[in-house]
Image (tube, grey):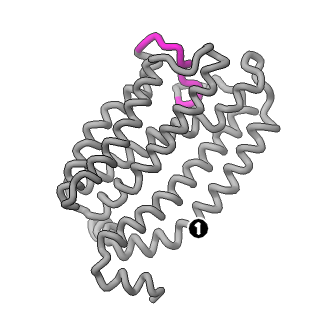
Amino acid sequence: MWTWFHKLGSPPHFYRIATRLTPWFGWAALLLIVAGVYGGLYVAPTDYQQLDGFRIIYVHVPSASLSLFIYVNMALAAAAGLIWRIKLAHAIAAACAPIGASFTFLALATGSIWAKPMWGTWWVWDARLTSELVLLFLYFGFMALRAAIDDENRADRASALLAIIGVINVPIIKYSVDWWNTLHQPATISKLGKPSMDSDMLIWLLIMLAGFMCYFVAVVLTRAKAEVLQRARDQKWVRQALEGK
């Protein structure tokens, strides 16, 4: 088990695996997102209260879910790098940050667009919205901290600590609608018991979520490969990889 873990943490081995897997996840993401968009816009029935305005859920919910999922994975990778001093783990954490920030911004933007006709305002300092905004600042802080420190090792350690501390915000976002009286609706999918959403609507949402997940994997592998090449630019295997050997 340790041998497998050590091999997986090898930058050359990771680079080869990532190169093989990226196209598969990329094509899967394209097919799933196209199917999800078509199903969400044209096949799913109209909501009896929100009419067609509810269809923004097919972008908003997957974006919000990925914003949390990516942060947790970024923090886990940063923790692995900090505890076991695995350089590759820090590279993966660095690769996750801009992708997570993009999904968080998309979740906030689509949420605001959805809120305007439903709540009558673009923004309220609701517990869910505010904690999601804090998540965006955590992503920005992680990237800014890395950019502000010239020494790579110090940047890895400092950003890893910030990522780990910031994990406390994830359950706050997740359970804010249960802990406080908020305008944001309660969970409709990720809860105990049967989802509150009609199955004819839910299936397309799950397809979109799978597509966004595949897109994240494809992009993070691509970014992590670039990060690994940058970190190991003076090593022989990098020259061989770039030459296609």
- Left or right of residue 54: residue 167: left
Residue at image x 60%, y 43%? 209
- In percent of width and height, residue 8 lies at 35, 68
Quick check: 175 above or below 180? below
Mark 1 residue type: Pro
Residue at image x 30%, y 74%? 232
> Which residue is at the front of the view, 48 or 193?
48
Confirm whether the magenta stretch covers residue 55: no
> Residue under circle 1?
23
| Residue, far bottom | 245
Dividing the picture into quadrants, the one containing residue 109 is top right
- In percent of width and height, residue 180 lies at 42, 13
Residue at image x 52%, y 20%? 123
> Which residue is at the front of the view, 8 or 41?
41
Q: Residues within 10 Å of mark 1 (few under 14, many from 20)?
A: few
Magenta stretch bounds: 180-190
Residue at image x 59%, y 32%? 110
Quick check: 71 above or below 53? below
Regarding residue 167, the answer to whether it shows in the image is yes
Q: Secondary structure at mark 1?
A: helix
| Residue, far top | 181
Confirm whether the magenta stretch covers residue 183: yes
- Classify the position of the C terminus by image quarter: bottom left
Q: Main secondary structure of the magenta part?
A: loop
- Left or right of residue 86: residue 219: right
- Classify the position of the N terminus by image quarter: bottom left
Regarding residue 7, the answer to whether it shows in the image is no
- Left or right of residue 78: residue 207: right
- In percent of width and height, residue 159 lies at 25, 48
Quick check: 113 above or below 214? above
